[in-house]
Amino acid sequence: MNIDHTLYQGRPQDKRIPQEEAIYDRLDQLSIPFARVDHDHADTMEDCLKIESVLGAKICKNLFLCNRQQTQFYLLMMPGDKPFKTKYLSAQLGCARLSFADEGHMEQYLQTIPGSVSALELLFDREGAVQLVIDRDLMKDDFISGHPGISTSTLRLAREDLLRYVQAVGHEPIYIDLPDPRQEEHS
């Protein structure tokens, strides 16, 4: 995986895909500063670990989920190194069963593709079909990172700025406390 080891401030000078440009435009409108690292497609958490060293911040895990009927959609943000167990989230949200939402719904609501989803794409969910869910463990970090519409760049925003962004695009997060399954193994 090729990573540009320059930590850029702000939007790129070259033309990007329309979704990425729209996210930069909204960040600019809100006067939200951010740092950026450009790289090849980073579709796995292993790829993201390599980017973290240049970014100077941890990259969070963003999971696009839905209920069995595919009528309720959730974007879960949690620490990248924390294992995810569906049963813990389902219980806290009061859903019988959650699974990963399909690519079609991701495109429909967030205008992105698997491996690229982040809270920044909530800009495109104008009907509020996607509920943002944040694991409180993520709020311990000063910065939160995510891809701007495509996983060829990663942005680092101050935690408060990311929260201001999602609220400005019409999404109020639900905060949850996901247990760490690794802790259960040691008890």
Image (cartoon, grey):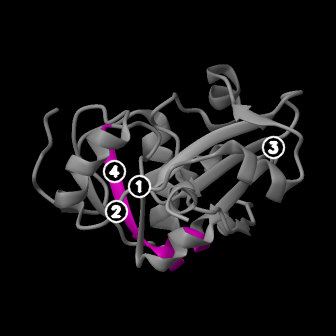
Among numbered discs 3 and 2, the one appearing first in the sequence = 2
State the residue position of label 3: 129
Cβ–Cβ under 8 Å for marks 2 and 4: no
Disc 2 residue type? Lys
Direction from residue 44 to residue 116 in the image, left or right: right
Other-residue count near label 4 (Cα within 10 Å), few / some / many at <14 / 14–19 / ≥20: many
Label 3 vs label 1: CA separation?
A: 27 Å
Q: Which residues are magenta?
A: 152-164
C-alpha span from label 3 to label 4:
25 Å
Badges 2 and 1: C-beta atoms under 8 Å apart? yes
Query: Which amino acid does the dot numbered 1 rest on?
Result: Asp
- Residue wearing tag 2: 58
The one nearer the camera, 72 or 26, is 72
Secondary element at tag 3:
loop
Q: Residue 177's image quarter?
A: bottom right
Q: Nearer the viewer, mark 3 or mark 2?
A: 2
Vertical placement of 103 versus 79: above or below?
above
Q: Which residue is mark 4?
A: 154
Q: Position of residue 71 (x, y in %)?
A: 88, 33
Residue at x-position 51% and y-position 66%: 29
Mark 3–mark 2 Cα distance, whole angstroms, equals 28 Å
Q: What amino acid is found at the position of numbered circle 4 in the picture? A: Thr
Quadrant holding the C terminus: bottom right
Q: Residue at x 50, y 57 (%)?
A: 182
Query: Going from the N terminus, do you reach mark 2 or mark 1 first?
Result: 2
Secondary element at tag 4: strand
At numbered mark 1, what does the secondary structure look like: helix, strand or loop? loop
Q: Nearer the viewer, residue 35 or 59?
A: 59
The residue beneath circle 1 is 81
Q: Residue at x 30, y 66 (%)?
A: 57
